Image (cartoon, rainbow, N blue to C red):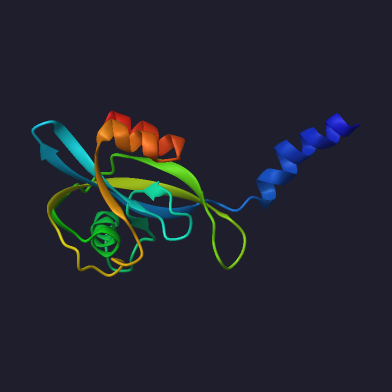
């Protein structure tokens, strides 16, 4: 009987009450060096883990434009160019101050970096680090993001 209840829960009830994933955009900020591409990671404000600059889509902006804005606000990046097509996406669980953890589907846009400044909106709240792609893939926690970085 427990197996039947468990199966009914997993296959019928749980999908009915599951909230859909929230949509976010991320900026894969990169530069070309003699040694290959490097990517820019920032720390999250809450946990201090290494992530890409990311956030919620902004009203009146495309997803790519929102990613460009996140790169500026969270990392001080001025973009040389931003790809309009996402490189891919990854899922993660966002811990929120106001309650339940929120599952997020995050589309990642390539942002070629023209310049980086130390004076940007979240300068005192985050660390930044340029890394070779493979090293960045080892630092991030989300498996989907690791895979995306390794394919970049």
Q: Is residue 59 above or below residue 109?
A: below
Q: Quadrant of the C terminus?
A: top left
Q: Nearer the viewer, residue 61 or 98?
A: 98
Taking the image as shown, residue 29 lies to the left or right of residue 49, namely left
Residue ranking furthest to the right: 1
**Residue 88 image-quadrant placement:** top left
Q: Nearer the viewer, residue 108 or 15?
A: 108
Q: Is residue 123 above or below residue 23?
A: below
Q: Is residue 64 above or below residue 139?
A: below
**Residue at image coords 54%, 62%:** 96
Q: Quadrant of the N terminus?
A: top right
**Residue 15 image-quadrant placement:** top right
**Residue at image coords 80%, 35%:** 6
**Residue at image coords 78%, 33%:** 7
**Residue at image coords 20%, 39%:** 38
Q: Position of residue 13 (x, y in %)?
A: 74, 45
Taking the image as shown, residue 91 lies to the left or right of residue 126, namely right
Q: Nearer the viewer, residue 146 or 136?
A: 136
Q: Position of residue 33 (x, y in %)?
A: 10, 37
**Residue 87 image-quadrant placement:** top left
Q: Position of residue 121 (x, y in %)?
A: 27, 70
Q: Nearer the viewer, residue 80 or 116?
A: 116
Give the total number of marks visible in the rendering: 0
Taking the image as shown, residue 10 lies to the left or right of residue 54, namely right
Q: Position of residue 84 (x, y in %)?
A: 21, 48
């Amino acid at each position: 009987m427990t197996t039947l209840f468990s199966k009914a829960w997993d296959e019928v009830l749980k999908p009915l009450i599951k909230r859909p994933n929230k949509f976010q955009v991320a900026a894969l900020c990169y530069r070309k060096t003699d040694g290959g591409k490097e990517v820019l990671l920032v720390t999250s404000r809450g946990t201090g883990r290494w992530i890409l600059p990311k956030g919620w889509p902004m009203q009146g902006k495309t997803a790519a434009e929102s990613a460009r804005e996140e790169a500026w606000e969270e990392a001080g990046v001025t973009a040389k160019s931003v790809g309009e097509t996402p490189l891919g996406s990854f899922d993660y669980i966002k811990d929120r101050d106001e309650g339940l953890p929120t599952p997020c589907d995050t589309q990642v846009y390539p942002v070629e970096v023209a310049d980086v400044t130390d004076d940007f909106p979240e300068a005192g709240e985050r660390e930044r680090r340029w890394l070779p792609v493979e090293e960045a893939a080892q630092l991030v926690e989300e498996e989907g993001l690791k895979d995306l970085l390794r394919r970049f």
